[in-house]
Image (cartoon, rainbow, N blue to C red):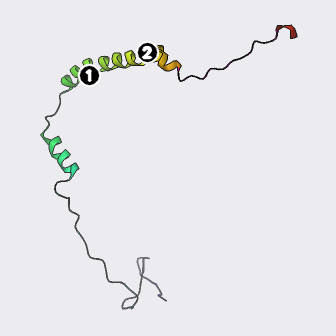
């Protein structure tokens, strides 16, 4: 059984010289692995020149409308053809009786 002693700074420390205590852990240094995937990405990213806002605006003014139109063409082509109709479940709802009014 280990009895803990309090110190003047209100921290609790185990008694010194007890046989149950483990030796302190050795400090270790963390190394980056050579040839890792993220290291290669980081190295290539540093070689890319910084983009000016004008360049980003130019490419986005072309890319966004093109992708938007392409998406709409594909979506509406699928939606309006028989491909989408084959996935729907057909239910028969009988007409309401008009004589029960």
Residue 24 percent location from the top left of the image: 31, 80
Q: Which residues are magenta?
A: 86-97
Magenta span includes 92: yes
Q: Residue at x 39, y 91 (%)?
A: 19
Question: Label 1's element?
Answer: helix
Say the numbered circle drawn on residue 60: 1
Up the image or down, 70 lies above or below 36; here it is: above
Q: Position of residue 64 (x, y in %)?
A: 30, 20
Residue 35 visible at all: yes
In terms of secondary structure, where does tag 2 sit? helix
Please name the residue that numbered disc 2 is placed on. 76
Quarter-of-image position of residue 70: top left
Q: Position of residue 15 (x, y in %)?
A: 40, 88
Write the residue at 25% across / 18% down.
62
Tell me residue 47's x, y (percent).
12, 40
Q: Residue at x 23, y 64 (%)?
A: 30
| Magenta stretch: includes residue 76 | no
Tag of residue 9: none
């Amino acid at each position: 059984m280990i009895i803990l002693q309090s110190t003047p700074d209100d921290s609790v420390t185990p008694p010194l010289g007890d046989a149950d205590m483990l030796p302190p852990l050795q400090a270790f240094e963390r190394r980056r692995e050579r040839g890792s995937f993220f290291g290669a990405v980081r190295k290539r990213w540093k070689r890319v020149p910084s983009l000016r806002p004008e360049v980003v605006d130019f490419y986005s003014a072309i890319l966004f409308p093109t992708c938007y139109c392409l998406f709409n063409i594909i979506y509406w082509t699928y939606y309006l053809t028989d491909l989408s109709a084959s996935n729907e479940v057909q239910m028969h709802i009988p007409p309401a009786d008009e004589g029960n009014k």
